[in-house]
Every structure is written in structure tokens, then in C-alpha cells.
Image (cartoon, grey):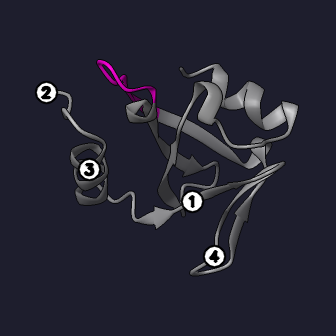
Amino acid sequence: MNSPDTVTGALQELKQRGYTVDFNIAFDKIICSDNKICLNPDEFEIVEVFRFEGDSNPSDEDVVYAIESKDGLTKGTITSAFGMYAETASSELIQKLSMHK
């Protein structure tokens, strides 16, 4: 399987594979506002990571994480800019995400 060339391509591929929940970082956890799902770092695993680096523009840098709850019932994605554009997150959450970069 070839890796997608864009963030949009990665998100589309993952959605086709069942990663349908759109998570966001909320300091010490990940949340989905649409269906009120909330997972702490010990409640999910990162199963795949796509990293995109901009050739000349730092704002083009992004990471797409495929996330699965430990009970296997919830699968979704997080997109998170890294470097100077990284979101504010707890040290525990940063450590979990950093292990997969």
C-alpha cells in the first residue's frame, strides 16, 4: 500500500478503513465534539501515523494520527500541526503522541 501524498488523502484513506471519528486535542485528552467521545491517553492507541513536511512553508507541516480506543469500539483521526504550530497539550498527551512521530 502506498502512503498518501496529502493530509486530505490520508484522512480519506483512513475514513474508508473505518476511522470515522474526528478527534481534537483538549489539553490532557482527545475529544470528539460531535458525539461527546472523550479518551484519556491510557484509553487509546495510535495505530498509524502519516507525517507531512512542507517543502518551503512551515505552515504546511502536519501529522495525521489513526487512533483506536483500547476496547476497539472507537476509531478516528487527529490532525495536529507540529513544531511552532503545535497545539497546547498536557505533557502526558505530548509524550504519547511524540512516541509515534
Tally of numbered discs: 4
Report which residue position mark 4 lands on: 33
Q: Earlier in the sequence, mark 1 or mark 2?
A: 2
Q: Is residue 77 magenta?
A: no
* Element under disc 3: helix
On the image, the x and y values in percent for residue 40 come to: 79, 51
On the image, the x and y values in percent for residue 48 come to: 43, 33
The answer to whether residue 8 is above or below residue 6 is below
Q: Earlier in the sequence, mark 3 or mark 4?
A: 3
Q: Earlier in the sequence, mark 3 or mark 2?
A: 2
User: Mark 1: which amino acid?
Assistant: Phe
Q: Earlier in the sequence, mark 4 or mark 2?
A: 2
Report which residue position mark 1 lands on: 23
Crowdedness of circle 4 by 10 Å Cα count: few (<14), some, many (20+)? few
Which residue is at a point 63% across and 55% down the rendered structure image? Answer: 71
Report which residue position mark 3 lands on: 8
User: Mark 2: which amino acid?
Assistant: Asn
The answer to whether residue 7 is above or below residue 26 is above
For the record, the magenta segment spans 48-58
Front-most of residues 53 and 91: 53
Which residue is at a point 81% across and 50% down the rendered structure image? Answer: 27
Residue extending farthest to the front is 56
Q: From mark 3 to mark 4, how far is it between C-alphas? A: 20 Å
Task: Answer with left or right where residue 2 lies relative to residue 17.
Answer: left
* Element under disc 4: loop
Q: From mark 1 to mark 2, how far is it between C-alphas? A: 24 Å
Residue extending farthest to the left is 2
The answer to whether residue 36 is above or below residue 2 is below
Q: Quadrant of residue 34?
A: bottom right
Report which residue position mark 2 lands on: 2
* Element under disc 1: loop
